[in-house]
Image (tube, rainbow, N blue to C red):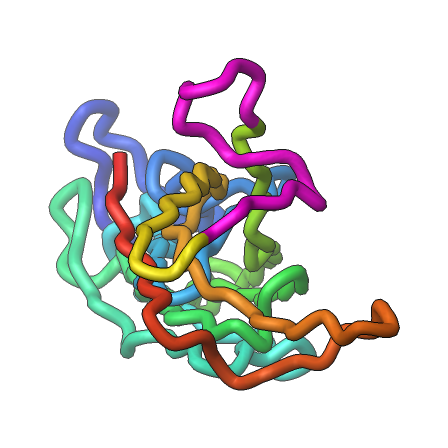
Amino acid sequence: PPSLFTGTALASPLVAVAWDEAVTPSSDVVLNVLVGYHFSYTVKAFDADVTDTVQLDVGATTGLPQRASVSAGVVSGINGGDANVIARNFTMLADVTQAGTFFETCYSATNANKDPLGIPLTIHRCIIISVELPIMRWFNSTTEGDNLTPAEGSRFSLYPGCVAEVPLHATSVWYKVVFGYEAYVVEFDGSEVRIPSLDGVSIDTSYT
């Protein structure tokens, strides 16, 4: 016979499986993922009928993005049941090739209603993630000596034995900024020839 709810003493033969909305991400929200950072969320389903079990599967149609995995189900119980709750964890470590892309992963949860208690019921949830592109900009100089980035095309005079320091100030939403440079020699005819590096040039980086 079906078990009884402790609070109501009512049999629960046709209780539907449901998502634990306090844990499972909504299908209406896009989750943001950062390149190079571990990202995870939990999908959890339950059936309030303590006699039922729940199965939680990843949809075969959408599957999983590369560099993502979903753990095996962890079974627990509520309302006095032993196996009427199941949870799985999605984890991903996105790489730079996935930046700017969206991925959808779908799940289905099915309870194990047995005749004459009712037929098994299945619910579905699709979750979308977005691998964020970096949003970068220079902090441009507005006043001499403010140690911000000179305007594009700025020229500096340098003499043998002297040191020239050029401040560069950049910001990136979500990501760490890494500076590099390209060096060119301006020929007498005005053409520019790229060279591998400039002797004596170094880049000192600090973060705030």
Q: Measured along the vertical axis of the image, is residue 28 above or below residue 76?
A: above
Q: Residue 173 versus residue 150: which sits nearer the camera?
A: 150
Left or right: residue 61 versus residue 135 is: right
**Residue 186 locus on image (x, y percent):** 72, 70
Out of 153 and 108, give the one closest to the viewer. Answer: 153
Say if 9 sits above or below 17 in the image: above
Q: Position of residue 72 (x, y in %)?
A: 28, 78
Looking at the image, residue 66 lies above or below residue 24: below
Q: Which secondary structure is most common in the magenta stretch?
A: loop
- Residue 26: where, in percent of width, then height? 54, 41
Q: Is residue 22 visible?
A: yes
Residue farthest along the right direction in this orientation: 189
Q: Quadrant of residue 169?
A: top left
* Stretch of the chain drawn in magenta: 141-158
Direction from residue 60 to residue 170 in the image, left or right: left
Residue 52 spot, x, y in % from top left: 32, 61
Q: Is residue 15 visible?
A: no
- The residue sitting at 52% across, 35% down in the picture is 149
Whether residue 55 sits left or right of residue 110 in the image: it is left
Indicate the quadrant containing the N terminus: top left, top right, bottom left or bottom right: bottom left
Q: Residue extending furthest top?
A: 143
| Residue at the image point whose x is 32% and y is 41% from the top | 11
Residue 176, magenta (yes or no): no
Instruction: Identify the residue at horizontal 53%, vertical 47% (top origin).
Output: 157
Quadrant where the C terminus sits is: top left
Residue at the extreme front of the image, as rendered: 160
Q: Tell me: 155 left or right of 35.
A: right
Residue 154 colored in magenta in the image: yes
